[in-house]
């Protein structure tokens, strides 16, 4: 129940991280037309990108 009292923060979102990385590519690089991903959901405990989700 301690997680319920944590402040809300953006959860993990690999799609957002990948989109940000692609927009930072140098000019002249290949850029694919794409729809920006939705922002990550707000969660109490975002988890860890280094741990599997079922751990």
Image: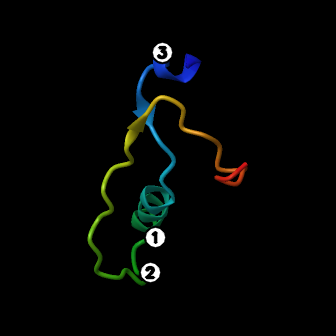
| Residue linked to disc 2 | 29
Residue lying at 42% horizontally and 57% vertically, measured from the top left: 16
Q: Is residue 36 above or below residue 3?
A: below
Between 16 and 51, which is closer to the camera in this rendering? 51
Q: Nearer the viewer, residue 3 or 1?
A: 1
Residue pointed to by mark 3:
5
Instruction: Give yes or no for contact between labels 1 and 2 (Cβ–Cβ under 8 Å).
Output: yes
Q: Secondary structure at mark 2?
A: loop
The CA distance from mark 1 to mark 3 is: 42 Å
* Foreground label between 1 and 3: 3
Estimate the spatial distance between the alpha carbons at disc 1 and disc 2, rounded to whole Å: 6 Å
Q: Is 28 situated above or below 7?
A: below
Q: From the top left corner, tell me how far across and down residue 14 is, in percent.
A: 51, 59
C-alpha span from label 3 to label 2? 45 Å
User: Tag 2 or tag 3, which sits nearer the N-term?
Assistant: 3
- The crowd level at tag 3 (other Cα within 10 Å; few <14, some 14-19, many 20+) is few
Q: Secondary structure at mark 1?
A: loop
**Crowd band around label 2 with a 10 angstrom C-alpha radius: few (<14), some (14–19), many (20+):** few
Q: Secondary structure at mark 3?
A: helix
- Using a 10 Å C-alpha cutoff, classify the residue at mark 1 as few (fewer than 14 neighbours), some (14 to 19) or many (20 or more): few
Return the x and y of residue 52 as percentages of the image width and height.
Answer: 70, 54
Residue 26 has which mark? 1
């Amino acid at each position: 129940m301690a997680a319920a009292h944590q402040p809300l923060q953006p959860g993990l979102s690999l799609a957002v991280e990948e989109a940000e990385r692609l927009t930072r590519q140098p000019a002249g690089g290949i850029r694919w037309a794409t729809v920006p991903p939705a922002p990550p959901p707000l969660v109490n405990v975002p988890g860890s990108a280094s741990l599997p989700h079922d751990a």
